[in-house]
Image (cartoon, helix red, strand yellow):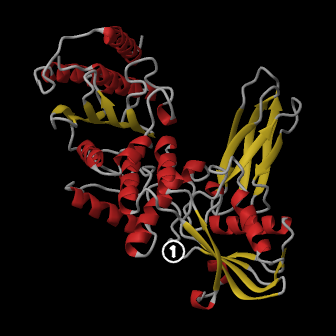
Amino acid sequence: MTNYRKSFLLSFVLLQATLCAQNYQAPAFNKYNSSRITEFWQQIDDIFNDPNFNSSNWGVVIKSLETGEYLYKRNEDKLMMPASNLKLFTTSAGLIILGKNYRYRTNLYINGNIEGSVLKGDLVIQGTGDPTISGRFHQDDPYKVFNDWADTLLSRGIEEITGNIIGDDKLFDENGLGEGWSWDNETYWYSASTSAISFNDNCVDVIIRPTEAGKQASLSLQPETRYVTIINKVVTVPKDTPTDIDVYRERGTNIITVFGKISENSEEFRTYSTVNNPTQFSLIVLKDILKKKGIIIRGYATDIDEEGVSLDYTKMKKIFTHYSVPLSEIVRVINKNSQNFYAEQLLKTIGLVKYGFGSIENGVKAVKNLLREMGINSEDMIMADGSGLSRLDLVTPRQIVDLLNYMYKHESFPVFYQTLPVAGVDGSLARRMLRSKAENNVRAKTGYLGGVRSLCGFVHTADNEPIVFSIIVNNYIVPATLADNLQDLVCLRLANFSRK
């Protein structure tokens, strides 16, 4: 039996013993009694001394939010890759700097004159980074917002546009991908490019359905768009063969190859591919929607960079503004679903609001300045992006706990707390810590990269004492479930911990 299997069994036995002890009722106590901490510390030490992780690095801080005591520390000031736990910094800063009620505004202007039912000129879309123009907040209808825009134009009497549909994305920089992102992940939804004008998370949905064994599978797109070219290399295979499908977009293009096999008795299989130049993608889909609504477009759908024009908004007329859902709902998507694209858009938005231009550099500057105001030392922290996808990101477990400790006392905490995944209930913790005292108790952000597993958040002990924790492991080579098991076991110990 391999060492990690032995350790898995040991962890399982410890977990069962913890669960069996849940119904124990101890006598009344002084909740500030610290005598049990030494015993608890040793128990947690034993967990992290698992031989499967001898060559790995654990960074851990567990702290009482009520007394300020540290229940456990290990490598608390060592810089570690946090993976998606970096989103805690981005979302906290967003709520504090922008406010929970902040809404993105996308402005539509006319650059020309309306004569009768004809706009003699251009329709200009000025983007400010809204990530939500998709089906996520519109009953899975990705076209809802664009259909509403078309209806508004028609209600203003505009039935024809002689010029172009121009997308102004100048409020964000052109660096759509984060520093240190893996080039071979660029196709996948979690590496979607940022843009001041975005649609459908800057991805196309690729829907594959089986046909007959030995024949090419059926394939469709959402949105249905001519912007991408699809090469279908998916074959239908017999019923007893598993489905295995992948997607690849040639770098710098919108040529997408879908390959693999789909079982003959399979339901439809949905995968996703990012697009190159999200602004152009958004405008082409918008133009198609306007045409379907009966609006004649004589010109092109074009990114302002491609058109090479200079826009003077003082000489244009704003015809309406589209508002996003409040930031509180956007942060919920980021933390519950670990949505990278939303996190990257938010970081650039923070930079835009604070310094007038949406870039990673400005966003990071704003976040680090805020951390200094919180009293958190951020000098040695490296924040290469807003989502944690970059392997260049480095933070310490103490910095994360200090951030969460600050948020616990901040007026935005009720909103922030509700955005975190709940153990055994939803988000990225929906299937973890089930049927235990940690279920529906632990609220924490997960993080995952190759060789990185992180879990940071809050839990209440058996005495209802609020605890903040950060548990990060880097450079493990055993199955990731073993790291999850140890993190979950610590959370169970915390949920069952009593000072009695």
Q: According to the image, label 1 marks what residue?
A: 171
> Residue 338's spot in the image, x, y percent?
49, 44
Residue plotted at (32% across, 31% down): 459
> Residue 3's spot in the image, x, y percent?
37, 16
> Residue 204's spot in the image, x, y percent?
70, 53
User: In the displayed structure, does residue 271 sit left or right of residue 225?
Assistant: left
Label 1 neighbourhood size at 10 Å, few (<14), some (14-19), many (20+)? many
Q: Where's the C terminus, which quadrant?
A: top left
Relative to the observer, which residue lies in front, 250 or 352? 352
Q: In this rendering, is residue 379 above or below 207? A: below
Residue 14, quarter of picture: top left
Q: In this rendering, is residue 234 above or below 381? A: above
Residue 460, quarter of picture: top left
The answer to whether any part of residue 384 appears in the image is: no
Looking at the rendered structure, the kind of residue marked 1 is: Leu
Relative to the observer, which residue lies in front, 119 or 341? 119
Q: In this rendering, is residue 149 above or below 124? A: above
User: In the displayed structure, does residue 160 sit left or right of residue 248?
Assistant: right
Q: In this rendering, is residue 18 above or below 144? A: above
Relative to the observer, which residue lies in front, 100 or 16? 100
User: In the displayed structure, does residue 447 sit left or right of residue 298?
Assistant: left
> Residue 217's spot in the image, x, y percent?
83, 38
Q: Residue furthest bottom?
A: 315
- Which secondary structure, mark 1? loop
